[in-house]
Amino acid sequence: MSKVVAELKYSAEHEWVAVDGSGPVNIGISAVAADALGDIVYVDLPEVGSTVTAGETCGEVESTKSVSDLYAPVTGEVTEINDGVVSDPALINSDPYGAGWLFKVAVTAEGPLLSAEEYAAANGGEL
């Protein structure tokens, strides 16, 4: 069973948000999504300085199985992208909640987010 991290919030589309209240939030995709996608080979992330809108597509994640849209779980300005994951997308599979984070956003509004418990219950993840 895929791991769900209790300290994070999640979108219904499988993105996670690390909200600590001290600045831009980290965003990535859950282990549930990474496991379902299989070996991730390419990511297309929003550009630094661009604005993302909660619930709208902002990039793509491509695996050996399929291409999936990446949805913004929050609205705000992209302040940083993870160059490490662009050059080595497999980091998403090996460490989705650590080195596999995707981008950071200075949040102006949150989309509808689930608690870890709600996300795990809906998607079969394990806390």
Image (cartoon, grey):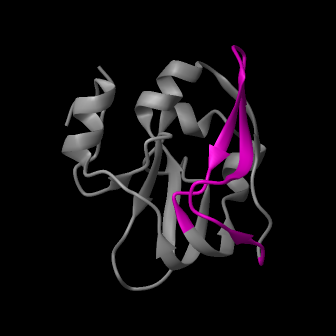
- Relative depth, front residue between 98 and 22: 22
Name the quarter where the N terminus is drawn: top left
Front-most of residues 118 and 82: 118
Q: Residue furthest bottom?
A: 22
* Badge count: 0
Seen at 19% across and 37% down, the residue is 127
Q: Which percent across, then down, holds residue 33?
A: 49, 30
Q: Which residues are magenta?
A: 49-74
User: From the viewer's perspective, is residue 63 above or below residue 20?
Assistant: above
Quarter residue 40 falls in: top right
Residue drawn where x is 59% and y is 39% of the image:
91
Q: Residue at horizontal 56%, vertical 38%?
A: 92
On whether residue 115 falls in the magenta region, the answer is no
- Left/right of residue 3 with respect to residue 33 in the rendered view: left
Is residue 61 shown above or below 78? above
Residue 79 is left or right of residue 27, and the answer is right
Instruction: Please provide percent x and percent y for residue 74.
Output: 52, 65
Residue that appears at 50% across and 40% down: 13
Is 80 or 118 nearer to us in this picture?
A: 118
Give the quadrant of residue 87.
top right
